Amino acid sequence: MSSNHSVPGTVHYVVHEPGGAASPLVFELRGPLTAAGAERIAARIVERHRSLHVSLESHTGAHRTLTITSSGAADHPAQLSPQLLADLLAVPPGAETVPLSGAQRGLAREAAARQEDRSRHVEQLAWTWTGPLDTSRFAAAWQSVADRECVLRASLDWVADPRMVLHERAAVNVVRHSRAALPWTDLVERDRAQGFELYRAGLMRLTLLDGPPADTGGGAQPTTRVLLTYHRALLDERAVHLLLREFYRAYLSGGALPGGERRPDVRDHARWLARQGTEAARTFWTRAAPPAEAAVSPGRAGGPTGQRGSAQVQRRLRSAQSLRLRAWAAGWGAGESSALHVAWALLLHRAAGVRGPTRVSFGVSVPGRDIALPGAADVPGLLGGSLPLTVTVDPQGSLGALVRQVRDAVLDMTAYPWVSDELIRQWSGRGEGGVLSDTALVFDSRPELPAAVRSELATQGIRVDVPHLVRGDTSLALTLVARHAPDGGLGLTALYDRAVLKDADATQALSQCVHLLCALAEFPDPHTSVGQVLRVLQGAVVPSAAPSTQTGQDALATLRVGQPDADVICLVADAGVVPGAYDLFARHHDGPETIVVLRCPTPPRALPTGLDEALGRGRRLLLCGCGPGALTAYRIAWTAAAGQDVVVIMTSIGSAADSASALSQGLRTVLARST
């Protein structure tokens, strides 16, 4: 789905000159803002920030002044909170926004911080369509689904806490290629490399590739390979299958779904989350959070891999092996997922290289669809996430006790699918940098296509395969996805970060996991020890894993030295600033000012030393921030020495070219006052 890309020139900018501590907040709204757009911004701030008083004054052209004061006591002036700034810079202005769930926030932050890797957090499903396929009807059916499901009309905004921005429409662009156009593998890779621009509405797309005719017994039928690509911050595989059910119904109905928007949807889920009390969850996670010394790495410490990007490797248990594993787990009062958790816990213990009892931690996928929200099971969206499961692996302990330990721990966690890593760190005192888990396990929960839909498709001469994962991604060192095959076997796909695990090490880890799963069925005796099972891997090489990268320090770089007495332009390069925006600005700016770039991994408490020295005396500081850099630019302005002449130019999120253009316009506005 090639989405409703925001048209060029939609990035607006805000100019702010800090006043005294008791002064109101005054912002100049400029750029491609209509009067209605400015009114929507003001109305949204009034709606979301009830303790504030807002007045909007229009001047000439596209110049408007927004003044914000506290509606409370005079000695409590208004403050520019991250949420207030996000509403001030939202695109489109005044659009409806939805807070992201815990897991989504982490994915969105990482995706925004690594936009140069466009394939990051992109997943692709593929299947074969046998029979006639009307491209216009196909596209119309998907458009009907997008009109019905707001998650398909969403973009991401990460000025402050990442959130969903809901657009009125996202146009579906279905691309169809002839059989001779390009090989399938090239199409998949090219589509994946295209990635998504997160600030544009609609983070899903479809590509069709004509295939050779297939003999279905009733004569040759045309075939088409369908590739569906989506971003993991908004959808998971189950959500895509829910959308597919709607699409097939729309296609069978001539390309349109009856009725308006389906509810409940992600908005209702967000409201449900906002009503949840945290006391019970806090009590549980204070006790159940992984300790700092927990073993989380899938391999022993090794050097750099010399690789980058993500990759995947697959293995499978045959039908008979899967059946035996299921029967073995049932004997312990557990399911196949518990058997997988046990095998992975054993591998983490082995990678830690500890002889005695070891606390190990890994993520377990919690769908979040069995919550007390009516209709939640059918809401397409990312409702759950991965929660850290911590268990003790004791070689002297019994295997049965370990099985029950993982089974019960997962059951306890499922009561809190909305809890994020951030909350767990906060409640357990782990701090922002604490690693809760480095790997995660996902057990397939795809809904099947209803038999009635398959029957109707067959009536129109159409047969569709079950979509399978072509390429995936992980935010961790490794994510292991397990799913049942049509023949009853159990397929395992390891999605891994090649900067952490070499291809050979990831393959070893998965192969050893499969070996353990097959071996577990050989230990039905309740007196079997964990050490006996571990001996199955005796002599096998332990995989290696590279250490995680460290957060960088503050850095000030000079892009251009200006005239001695000219102002200093400081571009604030927070994580999430659209790549290339500042380079484009510096390349085209022809004024006498010195231009520096400041990177601040953490919010500054004082004016950075290098920036203070660059200013000297009598030079004005022009702080510029695009998107998430805007808030840091504002905070730096308020840490400047008393009497320092400071102006802040803040832009909304958009393309590199639009962001650079907005900064240029903002600076021209400020500099024009000096002439």
Image (cartoon, rainbow, N blue to C red):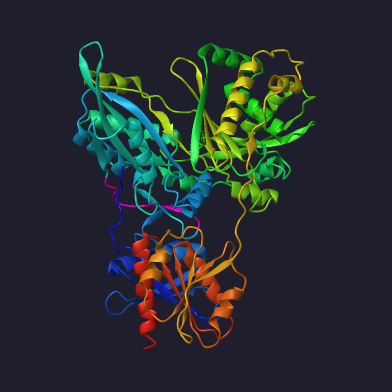
Tell which residue pokes out farthest to the front in this image. 306
Looking at the picture, how far across and down is residue 516, in whole percent?
A: 64, 21
Camera sees residue 89: no
Residue 651 occupies which quadrant of the picture?
bottom left
Q: Residue at x 45, y 49 (%)?
A: 117
Looking at the picture, how far across and down is residue 522, in whole percent?
A: 67, 13
Looking at the picture, how far across and down is residue 594, in whole percent?
A: 46, 78
* Relative horizontal placement of residue 358, taking residue 479 as reference (left or right): right
* Relative horizontal placement of residue 666, taking residue 368 as reference (left or right): left
Camera-nearest residue between 553 and 378: 553
Q: Residue at x 27, y 76 (%)?
A: 61
Residue 358 occupies which quadrant of the picture?
top right
Camera sees residue 582: yes
Camera-nearest residue between 121 and 141: 121
Does 468 appear above or below 440?
A: above
How many marks the image carries: the answer is 0
Q: Residue at x 55, y 79 (%)?
A: 614
Camera-nearest residue between 108 and 300: 300
Camera-nearest residue between 231 and 116: 116
Q: Chief secondary structure of the magenta span?
A: loop
Does 265 appear above or below 623?
A: above
* Relative horizontal placement of residue 19, taking residue 216 as reference (left or right): right
Looking at the picture, how far across and down is residue 157, in whole percent?
A: 43, 56
Does 589 appear above or below 114?
A: below
Segment tinted magenta in the rendering: 161-171
Magenta stretch holds residue 325: no
Q: Residue at x 59, y 12 (%)?
A: 324
* Relative horizontal placement of residue 527, taking residue 96 as reference (left or right): right
Image quarter hosting the N terminus: top left
Image quarter hosting the C terminus: bottom left
